[in-house]
Amino acid sequence: MDIKIKKKLNKSEYRNALALYNNSAAQEDIFISPPSADAPADMYILAYVGETLAGYFLVDLFEPYAEVRAMVDPAFRGQGIFYAMKSVLESELDDEYELLFITDNKSAAALHMIKKYHLREQQAQIGMERELARQFSTDVTAIPATDREEFLKYCTDGFSAELSIEEIEENTDFPASSPARFLLFKKGDEIVGSCILSVKERNALLSFFSITKNCRGLGYGHGAVRAVFNYALENGCRHIALNVSSDNKPALKTYKKAGFKETLRISLYYGPIQAA
């Protein structure tokens, strides 16, 4: 058995992983989403028996969890492949994340795995809820806030900080003459986040993007960014940009998965700190 750790799949590896998923789905009900080139994982663990891909882990890192979508070819089950991949992943992450295996805890195979590898049943249930949210996160839409006070309510919740409209306007990069759209992200009947879209001619700048505290880690960030794209296009914009701190890892991952590319990196230096 050969176990490989990959940050990105090549075309052949992606086809093999998708074929493994489809083969398994043809034999039993599968409740996790398949490998997707449009929404790549942060890490891949591939298990080969000879030249055959016998299993894989798709790993998404959402602190404090490493969420894992695991798949082992039915023909190779019972040969320790799952355990081998799990051991490699644990060694790679070095206790920085808690493993959260996304599965359906109504499945007999999943319950067997939970018992055999001492995974908490609660983790599996949380994982399934996250996976369902991830699959349906495209239902997120962007709508204008009723007024600035409504926007401020959700923006403050998303940033976990007391903010004022004045502070927000001072930190938007387009001049005050540019129309600013105060947007809310809606999933069903629930508001899950907010942002400001500053518009100038056919260009737009995304700022103050946030997901509310109770809705984080459910895949809404990616859906919300897509909703912003759609809103901007519908309102005549053809270019959208944003600024983000390089140490904001969750936001960077969300934006990259949505298709943003880094075009400029700025180093800020405020000079040496003077003793009082």
Image: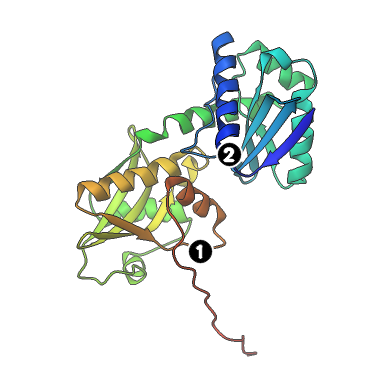
Percent from the top left, x then y, of residue 181? Answer: 25, 56
Q: Nearer the viewer, residue 90 or 130?
A: 90
The residue under the point 38% across, 54% down is 155
Where does the C terminus fall, quadrant-wise?
bottom right
Q: For numbered disc 1, what is the local secondary structure?
A: loop
Amino acid beneath label 2: Asn
Mark 2 or 1, which is nearer the eye?
Answer: 2
State the image coordinates of residue 46 (x, y, percent, origin top left).
Answer: 69, 32
Dot 2: within a 10 Å radius of its alpha carbon, few (fewer than 14), some, or many (20 or more) residues?
few
Q: Position of residue 62 (x, y in %)?
A: 59, 44
Q: Looking at the picture, which amino acid does disc 1 mark?
A: Ser
- Residue 124, placed above or below residue 23: below
Whole-number angstrom distance, CA of label 2 to CA of label 1: 29 Å
**Residue 30 visible to the viewer:** no
Q: Is residue 125 above or below residue 195?
A: above
Picture colour scheme: rainbow
Tell me the residue that label 1 is attached to. Answer: 245
In the image: residue 68, left or right of residue 170: right
Neighbourhood count class around disc 1 (C-alpha, 10 Å): few under 14, some 14–19, many 20 upward? few
Instruction: Report the disc number at residue 10.
Output: 2
